Amino acid sequence: MKKNLHFVGISGSLRKGSYNTMLLNAAYKLLPEGTTMEIVEIGNLPLYNDDLQSGSLPEPVSVFRKKLSTADGFVFASPEYNYSVPGTLKNAIDWASRGKDSPLVGKPVALMGATQGMWGTVRMQIAFRPIFQFLNMVPVNKPEVLIGQAQNKFDADYNLIDEPTISIIRQQLKELATLATHAQIIKEVTTEQN
Ligand SMILES: Cc1cc2nc3c(=O)[nH]c(=O)nc-3n(C[C@H](O)[C@H](O)[C@H](O)COP(=O)(O)O)c2cc1C
């Protein structure tokens, strides 16, 4: 079996003081033993245009897809925009979703979100489900990481300080590692059989 698991983390918010980027950075520090994560930016991607799929992909897109192709699983930390997935994140997913060599298809994913409001991005997380379904991705179903009142859960240095939230993130990442391990075992068995 492969030794270490590697994840790619993406924040759905581009703003400097983003709670979701803070959340992703917190997740980075809470990764289970034997796992690594690279946080990949999406702010430099052009708007999706299917015409650009025919020739060589725009440079930022091919770099992005290459980074994602190294992942055994994904961690998405995203705000909820208008009850749904922010356009910036959806754009990044659209770019990564096409072709037989899509770096997303079939892989495990942990979804988390933070908002200053009460509902902790629950509607964004529900809006994500059909995307995962179409891409045959394997989401961690439980526990859900829904962080409301985010302004009270990070300190002035952007550290996550809320113990119940820390604990649930740890659990979710552990589940992601379990799903990624299962995916590796299935891949190995399938390769051996072929
Ligand atoms: C375009 C836009 C739409 C938003 N829609 C929602 C929403 O539907 N539900 C919600 O709880 N908060 C909504 N918000 C507030 C965000 O949850 C809040 O700004 C949050 O801090 C953004 O995440 P960030 O700190 O990672 O940038 C919206 C904010 C913006 C800018």
Image (cartoon, grey):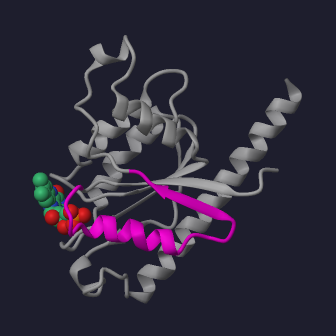
Residue at left offset 78%, top offset 46%? 185
Q: Looking at the picture, tell me which residue is in the foreground, 45 or 96.
A: 45
Q: If the picture is divided into quarters, which one holds ligand 1?
A: bottom left
Q: Looking at the picture, tell me which residue is in the foreground, 118 or 109.
A: 109
**Residue 149 is at least partly visible in this image:** no
Label count reads: 0
Asked whether residue 119 is drawn in magenta, I would say: no
Magenta region, residue range: 14-40
Q: Residue lying at the far front in this picture: please name it.
A: 59
Q: Looking at the picture, tell me which residue is in the foreground, 109 or 39.
A: 39
Q: Residue lying at the far top in this picture: please name it.
A: 54
Residue at left offset 36%, top offset 70%? 23
Q: Quadrant of residue 179?
A: bottom right
Tell me if 175 is positioned left or right of 187 in this view: left
Residue at left offset 50%, top offset 42%? 68
Tell me if 183 is positioned left or right of 135 in this view: right
